[in-house]
Structures are given as structure tokens and as C-alpha cells.
Amino acid sequence: MLILTLNCRRFSIQYQLFDWERRTSLAHGKVERVVVGDSFITHKVPGCEPRHLDAECTDHKDALRLILSTLTSPRFGVISDIGRISAVGHRVVHGGEKFTRSVLIDDEVIAAIKEVANLAPLHNNPNLAGIHAARELLSDLPQVAIFDTAFHQTMPECAFVYPLPYEWYEKHGIRRYGFHGQSHLYAARRGAAMAGVPLDQANMVTVHTGNGVSLCAVKNGTSVDTSMGLTPLEGVMMGNRSGDIDAGIVPFMLREAGISATELDLFMNQKSGVIGIAGRRMSRRDLVEEARHGDERCRLALDMEAYRLRKYLGGYLAVIGKPDAIVFTFTPGWEDWPVRGMALQGMEQFGIKIDPDRDNEALRNGTEMLISADDSRVKVFAVPSGEDMVLNEDVASILGWKKRPKDSHPAAYAAA
């Protein structure tokens, strides 16, 4: 039984073909520059050199057609025909309050995803484009939607309601939703297992790191607070997002700079964070190197990331009480993010003591490992992201391919 998972964004599609029975990835990759022109696919098969192919993709349907032809290619494909695929799983960023768990996709589900798309138009609309493409090109297959927001639907009202007129929540759905749910769920599972604590009794802070960064306070295995809010803009400083700012900056800049709301949204989501402080786009590795060689703006960007991350960590430790672990999970290319170690410095008063040698080893190798010192009262772990595994497990569970594991979270599964 093979599962094709899709993560459709505005101008790209990430994919993975997973063999559920053998619990192994057969291939994964990404189609980039969808819609904008000069499209290409990077296709990776374990144990083989990545393949780079140019092919024009005017929309997400073209991109999915390219993925399917690549997977079945006689030269570097991994299956003989698309009939080998048993199901499709779609990552959907925003489920609002309509979706508290993964669901089998039908017309009613599509309408509901579209209804909450105003909460994340840059994400849900491409997600819908991928769903429509898959339903057309793989019409015989069951399709499952897995929501970023589902894991956080266990937050108490005092955590998810904003201190704004309550009618805004009632009429417009303005509340904290949270994102990176699959990543936080996986991190919580692994953190509990590595700390030797049952998931339903585990208290920890999980940290998703990538170009987008978010934290989650996990109490007794469930999300009780998370740093991202109505949108992925809230929270800690990120690669190109500002994170928390004084809300008064918005009307101030609208008046003083004469820019539009649309332009301001672009600045905060795409031209702020690290690149806003550094003043230019660059790879994370180049940023670190420039900081080491004396670039003050690059150094400031790293210091600000660490400082704001440390503030959130301290607050969430207060929320969950006695922690069993802190778990940093990272997406590919972010295993060598130095801000993790910087943020954990000076937290001995919280019972957290980082082992620099272990942290450096984790940065070099990108493997799952303990990075706290032996005498640290709180264990700290670095864990590669398991978002894809959560997607596959949800698809399998909904289709009845497996029993729900004992350490699962109810929000992650639609089928018992």
C-alpha cells in the first residue's frame, strides 16, 4: 500500500511516496516555480543521486502530472505505473474550528476548507489547488486532508481567545489556531519516548525550527498553548516573518509611511524577521558565516532570534509546570541552526543545562540525540522532523490500515 503525500504551496509542491507496509520512503522531492515559469523538479530516491528535471508547470495540475510521470519514469522512477498508489494525503494549513482532526476528502470537506481559506489565503488556496488536481488525475483514489491546526484544538479558551472584543471571535473567528501541528505532535511523541514518560503524562515544550519557527506547550500529551496565532505571523522571530510586534505599529506605518495594508502585510510576512534585520536575503549558513566575520547586522539577527526564543521558552515552562523535556525538531537544511544552543545558554535556573559538545555533534550530523548535559534536570533533545510520518499515519488510520497506536493524540486521527 503506497501513499502519495502532497504539500502544495503557492509556487511549489513537495511530495513523498511512502510504502506503508514496509514503513519506508520510496522517493520524495519538490516541484518549484509552479505558475511563475522556468519550473523544475528535484527528485530524490534513497541511495541515489538527486535528479533535476526542467518542465514547465503553469499550474498545480501540471506540477502533479510531472510528479506522477517522474515517479513512473523507466529511467529513475520507483513504480511501474500510478495504479500502484493506494491513497493521497494532503497537508492543509488551516482548518479553522471546523476541523479538529484529519478527514477523508469529499465535496463537503472541500467547501469547508474553502470557507476558512480567508484565515490563510496564501496557504489554503494552493492546498485546494493540489486537492482539485489530485482528484482529477487520481480520481479513483481516496484522498485525506491533514490539518496543521488540528493538534492545537485542545487549547483552553483562556489560551486561544485574544483580549479583543469577544464579538470578533464569535463573528469573524479571530482566535489563536496555531500551526506546524504534525511537527509538534511528532516531537511530543519522540520526546516522551526518549524521556521514558507515557505521552498522556508528558509535559514538555516542543520547538519546530525551519524558515518558520513555532513553539508548543504540551501538558499531559496535549497542546495547551502555541506561539503562532490566527496566522503563522505571530510568535518568535523567523526567517522572513516578524513574529510578535506592537500592534500599534500597523496603524502608525499606514499613516506615516503611506503604504497600503497589502504592502504592510507583505513587509511583515516576507521582508521582516532575519532578512529584515540582516538587510538582505542569504542562506542560513552564509548568515552565520557573515556574523562570525564581523557583520553586525547578521550578528544582531542571530542574537534577536535567540533572545525571543528564550523568552517564549521561559513562558511556556511556566505554563506546563515541571517539564519532562524540551524537544527541538528541525526540517531538512536546518539541522545546523545555531540559535538553538544560543537560546539555551543561561537557563540553568530552569534546570536546563546544554552540553555544547553534544549540541555541536547534533548540528553536524542532524541526527536524533540528547543535547543536554548529564546533570541537567530537564532533558533536551534534537529530533529530525517527522511531519511526513504523521501524514502517512493519518492516511493509514482513516483508511483502516492500522490500529491507532497507544501514544497517538486523538486530534491526529479521524478513525479509531
Image (spheres, rainbow, N blue to C red):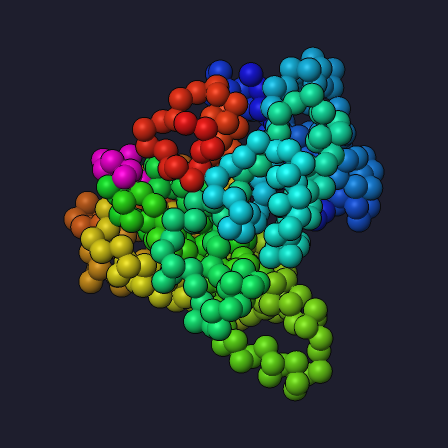
99 shown above or below 394:
below
Residue 323 percent across, percent down from the top left: 24, 51
Q: Residue at x 58, y 39 (%)?
A: 91
Residue 260 placement, left or right of 5: right
Residue 397 percent across, percent down from the top left: 47, 26
377 shown above or below 403:
below
Query: Looking at this view, is 407 or 18 the one in front?
Result: 407
103 shown above or below 87:
below
Q: Quadrant of residue 112?
A: top right
Q: Is residue 115 magenta?
A: no
Q: Residue furthest bottom?
A: 256
Residue 71 placement, left or right of 342: right
Q: Quadrant of residue 71?
A: top right
Q: Is residue 58 visible?
A: yes
The number of callouts visible is 0
Q: Quadrant of residue 85?
A: top right
Residue 397 placement, left or right of 218: right
Query: Looking at this view, is 101 or 243 the one in front?
Result: 101
Q: Is residue 210 visible?
A: no
Location of the N terminus (image quadrant): top right
Query: Looking at this view, is 91 or 49 the one in front?
Result: 91
Give the magenta part as a residue range. 191-200
Location of the C terminus (image quadrant): top left
Q: Is residue 198 magenta?
A: yes
Q: Residue furthest top?
A: 80
**Magenta segment, prevailing SS (helix, strand or loop):** helix
Q: Residue at x 37, y 37 (%)?
A: 409
Residue 251 percent across, percent down from the top left: 60, 81
Residue 375 percent across, percent down from the top left: 16, 48
Query: Looking at this view, is 111 or 17 the one in front?
Result: 111
